[in-house]
Image (cartoon, rainbow, N blue to C red):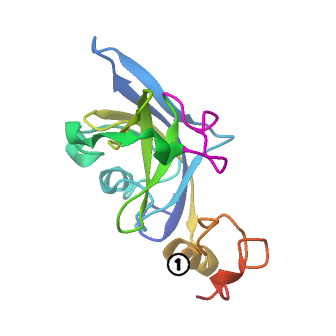
């Protein structure tokens, strides 16, 4: 079996990024015990990553580099935003120090309702500075990948990938409509 669209692929990988001195630093790793698993061709991985995997078989070792253009784009200085500290108050009207601290990744809603992840860069008395750039924006990504397994995707898996259930409050983590995500989600088919 080869890696092609609608195949579930499991692989180990190591992701390296060069530091300011050009020395590669290990940033992420997936092991045989906890592999990276995706469904090829369903948008779960970067398109250029999937292109490198296409046609490979179990046991293949692939070593490649993705440029910023192929990965998360160039770093955009306009991605740094100063927001009022009051946007990060908890239900008691106080700044949420437990979840909002320098280095934290916080979910933010865009004007069209999308949820994006932002990194907290600085906190002052009045503002919280966030960075909307992907942490790897502007970086060359050096991957070492080994294919562990390839199998056909099931109809249930494909349905879940293409039609994730999001009932609002739980952001898809509620399991099913009766597990406490709220009355407003209707039935699971909607």
**Magenta segment:** 89-102
Q: Nearer the viewer, residue 91 or 66?
A: 91
Res 141 quadrant in image: top left
Residue 99 showing in the rendered view: yes
Q: Position of residue 134 (x, y in %)?
A: 36, 42
Q: Is residue 18 above or below residue 145?
A: above
Name the residue rendered at 59%, 75% in the picture.
165
Locate residue 52 relative to residue 92 in the image: left or right.
left
Residue 87 versus residue 169: which sits nearer the camera? Answer: 87
Instruction: Determine the residue positioned at 27% across, 15% down.
Output: 22
User: Which quadrant would residue 29 be assigned to in this image?
Assistant: top right
Q: Nearer the viewer, residue 141 or 93?
A: 93
Magenta residue check for 175:
no
Residue at mark 1:
163
Magenta span main SS: loop
Q: Is residue 61 left or right of residue 32?
A: left
Tell me if I can see residue 74 in this picture: no
State which quadrant residue 98 falls in: top right
The local secondary structure at tag 1 comes to loop
Which quarter of the rendered picture does the C terminus lie within? bottom right
Instruction: Tell me which residue sits at (64%, 65%) in the image.
Output: 170
- Outermost residue to the right: 179
């Amino acid at each position: 079996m080869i890696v092609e669209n609608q195949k579930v692929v499991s692989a180990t990988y190591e992701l390296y990024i060069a530091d300011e001195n050009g020395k590669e630093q290990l940033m992420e790793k997936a092991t045989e015990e906890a592999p990276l698993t995706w469904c090829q061709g369903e948008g779960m991985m970067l398109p250029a990553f999937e292109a490198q995997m296409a046609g490979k078989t179990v046991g293949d070792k692939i070593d490649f580099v993705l440029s910023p253009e192929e990965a998360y784009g160039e770093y955009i200085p306009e991605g740094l935003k100063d927001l009022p500290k009051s946007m990060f108050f908890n239900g008691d009207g106080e700044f949420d120090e437990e979840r909002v601290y320098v280095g934290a990744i916080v979910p933010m809603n865009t004007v069209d309702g999308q949820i994006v992840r932002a990194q907290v860069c600085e906190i002052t008395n009045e503002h919280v500075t966030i960075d909307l750039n992907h942490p790897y924006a502007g970086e060359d990504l050096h991957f070492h990948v080994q294919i562990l397994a390839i199998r056909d995707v099931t109809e249930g898996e494909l349905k879940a990938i293409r039609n994730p259930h999001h009932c609002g409050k739980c952001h898809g983590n509620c399991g099913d409509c009766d597990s406490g995500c709220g009355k407003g989600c209707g039935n699971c088919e909607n």
